[in-house]
Image (tube, grey):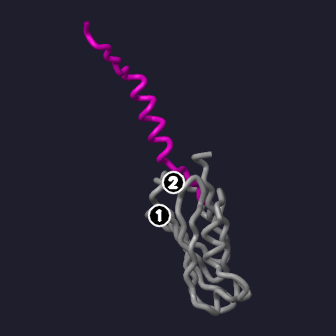
Amino acid sequence: MSPYRPSLRPGVCFAALALVLLGLIRVVEVEDKAGRHLLLLAPWDQGVVEFINSVTNRPVRIEFQLGRFFQGFAAYTDPETEAYYTEGTYTWNQLLKKEARKQLSYCSELGLFLKLGERWFSAQGECLEARILWPP
């Protein structure tokens, strides 16, 4: 008696591989004054926003992850600028790390930079918006 050996069908293997790849792709749309840009990113790619706070005139850097959402935020700046945002009543990064959003909007008069994966975007006197389109 021969043992039962299920055969792998090429269609089933292809469908399984396609599902795995779809789970790894992040489709992000970035909108700036030049138009809309589509990016294909991976969940291990990271995001960064850098700008100068117009009140304290000090740099702020916000880093985040690209999961199903923009998530895992962490901000880096001086204590005076952090106090400007929090009024000294809470730890900024404790709240930021809990944030999870499908869309980000940043505006700056002095200028800002947004990095998603390896691609940089910049704006001055205007806004940048980023939206995760996939996964839904």
| Residue 35 occupies quadrant | bottom right
Q: Name the residue located 52 percent from the left edge and 66 percent from the top edge.
A: 47
Helix, strand or loop at mark 2: strand
From this viewpoint, which residue is outermost toward the left?
Answer: 1
Residue situated in front as seen by the camera: 98 or 78: 98
Within 10 Å of disc 2 (Cα), the crowding (few <14, some 14-19, many 20+) is some
Q: Is residue 100 left or right of residue 89?
A: left
Point out residue 73 in the picture as x, y percentages from the top left corner.
Answer: 58, 69
Quadrant housing residue 10? top left
Q: Which mark is residue 119?
A: 1
Whether 4 is among the magenta residues is yes
Which disc number belongs to residue 39? 2
In this picture, which residue range is highlighted in magenta? 1-30
Q: Is residue 59 left or right of residue 103?
A: left
* Badge number at residue 135: none
Cα distance in 3D space between marks 1 and 2: 9 Å
Q: Are marks 1 and 2 in contact (CB under 8 Å)?
A: yes
Residue 115 in the image: x percent, y percent?
51, 68
The residue depicted at 52 percent of the width and 70 percent of the height is 48
How would you rate the neighbour count of disc 1 (Cα within 10 Å): few for under 14, some for 14-19, many for 20 or more? few
The residue type indicated by label 1 comes to Arg
Camera-side residue of 119 and 45:
45
**The N terminus sits in image quarter:** top left
Q: Residue furthest front?
A: 1
